């Protein structure tokens, strides 16, 4: 999935975020670097290349043909 060559990347991140990320990574048996790599890989791919979770795959296309104005009218009525 990933090339064997690993380049270094320096990021500036808030200390609190780093601490929480380390706890998160340790609880999942991985590293912050691996989490960041997966996140960057996912957000940098064209949408069609992204592997959908089963739930998202089932919902995909469910609103095809829906009129967005129907939803806007619903929200207007709801928040009057």
Image (cartoon, rainbow, N blue to C red):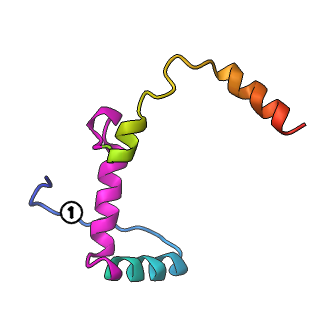
Q: Which residue is mark 1?
A: 7
Quarter location, residue 28 = bottom left
Q: Is residue 52 above or below residue 3?
A: above
Residue 23 % position (x, y): 41, 83
Q: Is residue 68 above or below residue 76?
A: above
Residue 32 % position (x, y): 33, 73
Residue 8 % position (x, y): 25, 66
Q: Nearer the viewer, residue 43 or 71?
A: 71
Residue 2 % position (x, y): 15, 55
Quarter location, residue 57 = top left
Task: Give the total number of marks visible in the rendering.
Answer: 1
Q: Nearer the viewer, residue 31 or 7?
A: 31
Quarter location, residue 51 = top left
For the stretch drawn in magenta, what is the main secondary structure? helix
Q: Residue at x 26, y 37 (%)?
A: 49
Residue 24 vs residue 3: left or right? right
Q: Was residue 24 drawn as part of the magenta stretch in this picture?
A: no
Q: Is residue 59 above or below residue 41?
A: above
Residue 56 vs residue 68: left or right? left
Query: At numbered mark 1, what does the secondary structure look like: helix, strand or loop?
Result: loop
Q: Residue at x 34, y 64 (%)?
A: 36
Q: Was residue 48 drawn as part of the magenta stretch in this picture?
A: yes
**Which stretch did the figure color magenta?**
27-51
Residue 40 vs residue 70: left or right? left
Q: Nearer the viewer, residue 23 or 6?
A: 23
Q: Residue at x 9, y 60 (%)?
A: 4
């Amino acid at each position: 999935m990933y090339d064997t060559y690993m380049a270094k990347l320096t990021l500036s991140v808030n200390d609190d975020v780093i601490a929480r990320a380390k706890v998160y990574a340790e609880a999942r048996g991985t590293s912050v670097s691996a989490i960041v790599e997966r996140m960057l890989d996912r957000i940098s791919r064209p949408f069609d290349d992204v592997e959908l979770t089963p739930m998202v795959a089932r919902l995909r296309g469910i609103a095809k043909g829906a009129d967005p104005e129907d939803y806007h009218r619903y929200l207007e009525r709801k928040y009057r």
